[in-house]
Image: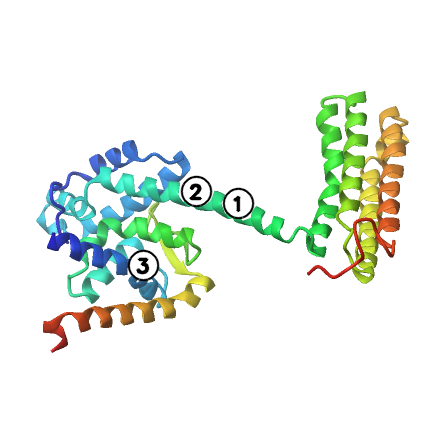
């Protein structure tokens, strides 16, 4: 082991204390870094106990270098990873944009479109169902239906049929599944559940039917059907 | 100046050396440091301070996976093991390092003779 220039080591407790002070990362990660370095230092010191505990700890901490420097490197590494991760999201978004006319991207849109109106409804209605919630539900469903339909303008008939079958199955399954969860409320005669599901299920069916009709249109608006993948 | 050049050279090769060691079996930080020191006959002991940043970077890149394992008493050690992605790149990384080292040696007159 070699001492770093300008740093001659200290006790493990002091080293870890200064490392913790200088680390600028979330506490959970700081705890992980410190625990890892602590084990390292204890292992290194244990091998040198013959020279006395204090000297062994100084040698061990000296071999790792200045804790300020180590903390800075760990912090920079953490920040770099954060930036790279956000860069990955950016890359994913750019890739999605590049392929957004592909059948897979369109299918993704349809899959994503189902939970959104309901999420918006609950958000606007919280804590009690409200007219704003119902309006949000209608607006979101209409927007997503129109948006979804517009994405299918360049699909082949085979692709359109496959997606139509998938969307239909998904829509029916989601409607039935969620309604079944609220069946107790319906049986109790709770007005909210009755009104909600008497609206939500027809909207889902209309949404699906409109998509199916649009998908089976041999000459959709915006151009001839063609393979885009 | 010379010390800085040597340090940079060692630092650049650290990730490949870590991947090479971990390709054999999972190890913890101190074990990696001692293995590097003993296998390099003491030449790579100065990289100990950069060991953890390098390990964390390799982990963030998906080449390694870190996990805690209990040892004696309440102590735990953080082991690192190779991921499938890491196994895929280690051969290429070793080959690149060999090629780089060969190129460097060919440019140094004393070593080329």
Does residue B54 appear anywhere in the picture?
Answer: yes
Q: Residue at x 35, y 66 (%)?
A: B93
- Do discs 2 and 1 share a chain? yes
- Do discs 1 and 3 share a chain? no
Does residue B70 appear anywhere in the picture?
Answer: no
State yes or no: discs 1 and 3 in contact (Cβ < 8 Å): no
Q: Nearer the viewer, residue A209 or A11?
A: A209
State yes or no: discs 3 and 2 in contact (Cβ < 8 Å): no
3D distance between C-alphas at marks 3 and 2: 21 Å
Q: Nearer the viewer, residue A119 or A91?
A: A91
SS for callout 2 = helix
Determine which of the numbered discs, if any, sits on residue A90 in the image. 1
* Badge 3 density bin: few <14, some 14–19, many ≥20, Cα 10 Å: some
**Taking A127 as reference, is B108 above or below it?**
below
Q: Nearer the viewer, residue A96 or B46?
A: A96
Q: Residue at x 11, y 72 (%)?
A: B109
Task: Describe residue B17's horizontal placement relative to residue A190 as left or right.
Answer: left
Direction front: furthest residue: A223
3D distance between C-alphas at marks 1 and 3: 27 Å
**Taking A131 as reference, is B42 above or below it?**
below
At which x and y percent is residue B54? 32, 52
* Badge 2 density bin: few <14, some 14–19, many ≥20, Cα 10 Å: few
Which comes before the other along the chain, label 2 or label 1? 2
Q: Chain of mark 2?
A: A
Q: Which residue is mark 2?
A: A83
Task: Describe residue A69's horizontal placement relative to residue A34 as left or right.
Answer: left
Q: Which residue is mark 3?
A: B15
**Quarter in which the C terminus of chain B is drawn:** bottom left
Q: Chain of mark 1?
A: A
3D distance between C-alphas at marks 2 and 1: 10 Å
At which x and y percent is residue B48? 22, 52
Colour theme: rainbow
């Amino acid at each position: 082991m070699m001492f770093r220039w300008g740093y001659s080591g200290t006790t493990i407790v002091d080293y870890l204390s200064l490392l913790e002070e200088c680390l600028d990362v979330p506490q959970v990660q700081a705890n992980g870094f410190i625990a890892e370095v602590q084990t390292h230092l204890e292992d290194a010191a244990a091998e040198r106990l013959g020279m006395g505990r204090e000297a062994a700890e100084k040698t061990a901490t000296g071999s790792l270098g200045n804790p300020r420097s180590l903390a800075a490197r760990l912090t920079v590494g953490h920040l770099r990873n954060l930036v790279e991760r956000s860069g990955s999201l950016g890359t994913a978004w750019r890739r999605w944009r590049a392929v957004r006319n592909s059948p897979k991207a369109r299918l993704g849109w349809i899959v994503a479109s189902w939970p959104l109106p309901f999420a918006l409804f609950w958000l606007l209605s919280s804590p009690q169902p409200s007219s704003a919630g119902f309006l949000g539900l209608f607006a979101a469903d209409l927007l997503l239906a129109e948006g979804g339909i517009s994405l299918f303008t360049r699909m082949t008939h085979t692709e359109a049929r496959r997606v139509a079958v998938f969307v239909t199955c998904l829509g029916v399954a989601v409607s039935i599944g969620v309604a079944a969860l609220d069946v107790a409320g319906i049986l109790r005669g709770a007005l909210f559940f009755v009104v909600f599901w008497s609206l939500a299920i027809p909207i889902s069916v209309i949404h699906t039917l409109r998509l199916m009709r649009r998908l089976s249109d041999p000459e959709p608006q915006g151009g001839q059907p063609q393979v885009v993948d | 100046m010379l010390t800085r050049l040597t340090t940079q050279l060692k630092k650049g090769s650290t990730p490949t050396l870590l991947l090479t060691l971990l390709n054999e079996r999972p190890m913890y930080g101190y074990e990696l440091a001692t293995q590097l020191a003993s296998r390099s006959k003491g030449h790579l002991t100065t990289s100990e301070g950069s060991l953890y940043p390098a390990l964390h970077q390799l982990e963030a890149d998906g080449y390694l996976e870190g996990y805690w394992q209990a040892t004696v008493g309440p102590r735990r050690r953080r082991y690192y093991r190779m991921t499938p992605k890491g196994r895929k790149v280690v051969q290429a990384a070793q080959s690149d390092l060999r090629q780089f080292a060969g190129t460097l040696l060919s440019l140094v007159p004393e070593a080329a003779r």
